[in-house]
Image: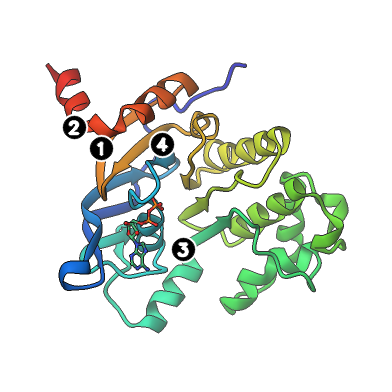
Amino acid sequence: MVRKRNQGPTPASGEALRLESVTKVYGTGDGAVTALDRVSLALPTGSFTAIMGPSGSGKSTLLQCAAGLDRPDSGRVLVDGEEMTGGSEAALTKFRRRRIGFVFQNYNLLPTLNVLENTTLPLKLAGRRIDRARAQEVLMQVGLGGRVKHRPDELSGGQRQRVAIARALVTEPSVVFADEPTGALDTRSARDVLRLLQEAVRVHNRTVVMVTHDPVAASYADAVQFLADGRLAGQLFAPTVDAVAERLAHLGDAVATDVRSEV
Ligand code: ADP
């Protein structure tokens, strides 16, 4: 399969997401766990990044902090150059609603709302004008133009996840965070979902950050950032399935691997 990759910087590229020395510690005293240890990362606008690492390496915590769902203990998170981590809880919620889109493993659709209503919900929550034509257009893009009146329980898993992607894109967010978006899907639906995320990046210049444990899913991204013990442990650009699997297998000795590859 031949897939086009981003070649070089996108026109008018900026930095969609920046983490500066983000640290998160759970608990106190002897029981304290450093889930993230001074993680710094800068992702350009129009990039698709996969975050990978063993269970407990800090992937969820990274996503929660980067997406403004949780606050780091220290360090800063900037979205489109604007600091997200500074203000009040209400300000953070407002910022998140305006700038961030989410796609979860279990779709998180509201069962009583139809496809169109689920898609426009973030606009409603943000107090923004509901542009039905725009929502329809996004639903067309994800291949659900003919199902706007269906409820989630009338759709397959892959279709539900495509609604979730439409919902994430309708607000035109700076960054879309996807947490194991293909974890509950069969191979074919997973591929459709990954292609849609790719299209959001390549065609619409969105920025996508995806946590995944699946090297196939990660191979759709432009780059993979590996985490081990709450620290970044290397990155891989234009990742292939084999290269990702190989790096994951050796993540335990990631530091040694990095040192070797530099000499
Ligand atoms: P991953 O997503 O890679 O599995 P997590 O970010 O969930 O990793 O967890 C990183 C570390 O932080 C783990 O050691 C985990 O046990 C710990 N942790 C995560 N959330 C909490 C919490 N709410 N309370 C205490 N420890 C937590």
Disc 2 and disc 1 in contact, CB within 8 angstroms: yes
Residue picked out by circle 3: 99
Q: Quadrant of the N terminus?
A: top right
Residue at position x 69%, y 71% in the image: 130
Q: Nearer the viewer, residue 74 or 142?
A: 74
Residue 57: percent from the left, percent from the top?
33, 48
Q: SS class of the residue under badge 1?
A: strand
Residue picked out by circle 1: 233
Q: Nearer the viewer, residue 118 or 71?
A: 71
The disc at residue 255 is 2
Amino acid type, label 4? Pro
**Sooner in the amino-acid sequence: mark 2 or mark 4:** 4
Using the numbered discs, state the Cα–Cα distance from disc 2 to disc 4 in whole angstroms: 34 Å
Amino acid type, label 2? Val
Using the numbered discs, state the Cα–Cα distance from disc 4 to disc 3 in whole angstroms: 20 Å
The disc at residue 95 is none
Residue picked out by circle 4: 11
Is residue 235 in view?
yes
Amino acid type, label 1? Ala
Amino acid type, label 3? Arg
Residue 35: percent from the left, percent from the top?
28, 58
Using the numbered discs, state the Cα–Cα distance from disc 4 to disc 1 in whole angstroms: 29 Å
Disc 1 and disc 3 in contact, CB within 8 angstroms: no
Residue 26: percent from the left, percent from the top?
27, 68
**Sooner in the amino-acid sequence: mark 2 or mark 3:** 3
Residue at position x 59%, y 16% in the image: 2
Residue 178: percent from the left, percent from the top?
52, 51
All told, the count of numbered labels is 4
